[in-house]
Image (cartoon, rainbow, N blue to C red):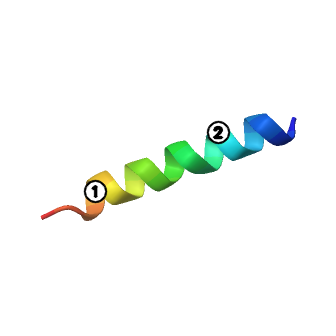
């Protein structure tokens, strides 16, 4: 469960970084 949460946060962070790129 904790591992799943960590992966979910990691994916969201990656998406935000990708969208944040110019």
Residue located at (12% from left, 64% from top):
22
Image quarter in which the N terminus is found: top right
Q: Which of the two discs, 2 and 1, labels the residue nearer the N terminus?
A: 2
On the image, numbered disc 1 is attached to which residue? 19
Say which residue appears at 29% left-offset and 52% top-offset: 18
Label 1 crowd (10 A; few <14 / some 14-19 / many >=20): few
- Which of 6/22 is in front? 6
Relative horizontal placement of residue 20, taking residue 16 as reference (left or right): left
Q: For the residues carrying marks 2 and 1, which lies nearer the camera in this image?
A: 2
In this view, the residue in front, 6 or 20, is 6
Which residue appears at 28% of the width and 56% of the height?
19
Apparent side of residue 10 relative to residue 14 in the rendered image (left or right): right
Residue at the left extreme, as displayed: 22
In this rendering, is residue 4 above or below 10? Answer: above
Question: According to the image, label 2 marks what residue?
Answer: 7
User: What kind of element bears circle 1?
Assistant: helix
In this picture, residue 9 sits left or right of residue 21: right
Distance, label 2 to label 1, CA atoms, is 18 Å
Classify 10 Å Cα crowding around label 2: few (below 14), some (14-19), many (20 and above). few
Q: Percent from the top left, x then y, of residue 6?
A: 70, 45
Residue at 27% x, 64% y: name it.
20
- In the drawing, does residue 16 fall left or right of residue 12? left
Q: Position of residue 17 (x, y in %)?
A: 34, 58
Q: Secondary structure at mark 2?
A: helix
């Amino acid at each position: 469960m904790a591992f799943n949460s960590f992966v979910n946060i990691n994916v969201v962070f990656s998406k935000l970084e990708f969208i944040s790129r110019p």
